[in-house]
Image (tube, grey):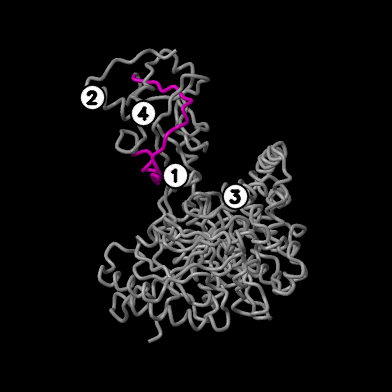
Amino acid sequence: MDIPVHSIAALRKGYVERRWSVRAVAEAVLARAAAAEADDPAIWITRVAADRLIAEAAALDAKGPANLPLFGVPFAVKDNLDVAGFPTTAACPDFAYVAERTATSVARLVAAGALLVGKTNLDQFATGLVGVRSPYGAPRSPFDSRYVSGGSSSGSAVAVSRGLVTFSLGTDTAGSGRVPAAFCNLIGLKPSRGLISAAGVVPACQSLDCVSIFATNADDAAAALAAAAGFDGADPYSRAPLAPVDGPLPSAPTRFRFGVPRAHNLVFFGDGEVEALFAQAIEGMKRLGGEAVEVELAPFFGVARLLYDGAWVAERTAAVGDFIAAHPGAADPTVSAIIMKGRDLAAPAAFDALHRLEALRRECEPTWETIDVLLAPTAPTAYTVEAIRADPIKLNANLGVYTNFVNLLDLAAVAVPAGFGASGRPAGVTLIGPTHSDRALLALADALHRAGGEATVGALGLPLPSPGRRAGPWSAGGGIDLVVIGAHMRGLPLNRQLADVGGRFVASARTAPIYRLVALAELDPPKPGIVRVDKGGAAVECEIWRLSTAAFGAFVAGVEPPHAIGKVALEDGRSLPGFLCDAVAAAGQPDIGAYGGWRKWLAAQAEGGAPVRAAR
C-alpha cells in the first residue's frame, strides 16, 4: 500500500478511516529512506534504528490519537539539535557527543505524537547556504543532482521534498531554513526569533538562531509551529507568542500592500529563470488583492553585510572557535576560515557593529509604515556543486542576498515555492513581515502557493492537498497591540469597549519596573494610572490586546484625560502603545505600586487591605 506521508491531512484521514496504522507508516518510511540512499546517501547522518522506530510506532498505535495533534506524523531534525541518546555531530565527527537531553522543540513535537525518523545532514556548524560543507557528503537537489540542495539545513529539506518525512526541523541564522526550501520546492518557515525554543541547539550565532520548519504546504508548517512554539526558560532568547499559534490559519487578505524591491535592488546574477518567476509572483500577489509598493532595500542590504563583516562572525567564534582551535584539521577548511575570522575582532569593533545595526534598523523602520509584507526572491540563482566547490565563499554569499538581513532585524519570513523554470528546477520567493506575524505570513504564503493553480509538493509531482479550514478575519500586519493596565482588562468594567471594536486578548504581561502606579479613585469607574519615574518605580501587571488599524484609531480617539496613549516599556524589552497618565493629575494620588497591579489592589481593597500612601 502506498501511504502518503507528504501531508498531515492525508495521514490523519488514513488513521481515522483505519486504512493504516502508525506501524505501517513507519515501515513505509523505512523503505523509502533505504531506497533514497541508493542515489543520495548524504541526506541522513543518524537514523533511528528500524526496531526502535517500529516499537515507537506501535506505542503510538496503543495510545491512540486522542489529544495528539501530530499523531503518527513522521519528521526529521537537523543534526545540530539534540536528541537524548543520539549523537549530535553538527556535521563534524570530532565534535560529536551523545546528547543527555532532547532539544525543547523536538521534545514538544514528540509529545504531540510526531514520530522522529532521524537526524539530517547540514553544512558543518550550520555555516553555509549551500549544503556541500559536510564530511558526510552533499545532499543534492532532488530535481537535478548536479545542483546543490541549499543549506545549511540541506538534509532536512531534501528529506521532506523526497517524501521521506512529512515535515522537518532545520535552523536559520542567515537563510538556512529558506534557501533550501526554494531549491527543494517547499514551504520554509523562519519563525520570529525565540518563538520556537533553541534550547538544545548547537549555536551558530546564538542571538540570531531560529529553529525553522520545512513542509510541503503552509497548513503542515502551521501545525508543526503550533506544537513546537512556546516560551522556554531554558533558552535565554525565548519569547512567549504574542498571539495564539494553534488552530486553523487565518484567511488570506483580499486587500493588502506588499513591498517590491526597486529595480536597482534586484540582482539575479544572470539567472533569467528566477527573474521571470519572481515577476510572476508579483503578478500573483496582485491577483490576490495586493497593491505593489516599491521599497528601497539599501538599508536592508547594509544590515546584511554586518552578518559576516561585523560582530556576529565573532559570535560564531564564541560558539565553536575553541573547539576548532584545539582540533586542527577537524573542521571543513571553508567553515574554519569563516568562523576563526572572528578572533581578529576587538571589543570596540563589536560595539561599533551593534551601533551600526541600530542606526540601520531606524532606516528600515519607515518601510513598515507603507507595506504590510515584503516580497523578495528567496535566492537570486542556483549553483552546481562543482561551481560551489570552485568558489565557495563568493557564490555562497550570492545566495544570501535576500536572506541575511532578516534575523538581524528580528523579522519573520516564509519561503514559498514560485514555480519551475524551463530547466525543470524550482525557484522561490519569500514573504517577510514584522516579528510575530508568522501565522499571517503562512496564510498569505498558502494563497500565493496556490495562486498558479498547478502547484506540486516537493519533488513528488503530487498536487497540493486541499487547504485547511480557515479562520478570519485576517490582517496582513497582524493589527496593533495595545497595553492596558486597569479597567479595560478582562472582567473589569470597561473591557467591553475593547470587545465592541473587535479587540482580541493576546497575552498577560508586566511593564518594565520604571513606573509609579496610582489610584484615580475619583473617576467613574475607578481607574489606575502609570507615570514614568527616574527611580522608585515598580513593574505593573498589564494585558496586551490586539486591534485592527481602524479599530485602534477609533479607540484612541475616545481616550479622555487624564489618560493618553503613549509607548509603554514592557519587562521583556518591547515598547508598545498603551495607557499613560498625566503627571500633574497623578500628583498626590494614592501610590499603589507595592501591589504590582490594579487587580491585586482591587482584591486587597475588597478584603479591607492596608491603606496606601500618597504619591509624590
Amino acid at pointer 2: Ala
Which of the two discs, 3 and 2, sits closer to the camera? 3
Which of the two discs, 1 and 3, sits closer to the camera? 3
- Circle 3 sits on which residue? 319
Cα separation, mark 4 vs mark 3, equals 41 Å
* Disc on res. 546: 1
Q: Which residues are magenta?
A: 496-521
Question: Horizontal and vertical percent for residue 89?
Answer: 54, 62
* Disc on res. 266: none
Amino acid at pointer 3: Ala
Which of the two discs, 4 and 1, sits closer to the camera? 4
> Is 419 in the magenta?
no
What's the residue at 64%, 61% (across, down)?
Answer: 330
* Disc on res. 606: 2
What's the residue at 63%, 44% (across, down)?
Answer: 365
Q: Which of the two labelled residues, at mark 2 and mark 1, occupies the earlier sequence position?
A: 1
Cα separation, mark 4 vs mark 1, equals 21 Å
Q: Looking at the figure, which quarter contains the N terminus?
A: bottom left
> Is 518 in the magenta?
yes
Proximity of marks 1 and 3: CB atoms separated by less than 8 Å:
no
Q: Secondary structure at mark 3?
A: helix
Q: Which of the two labelled residues, at mark 4 and mark 3, occupies the earlier sequence position?
A: 3
Amino acid at pointer 4: Gly
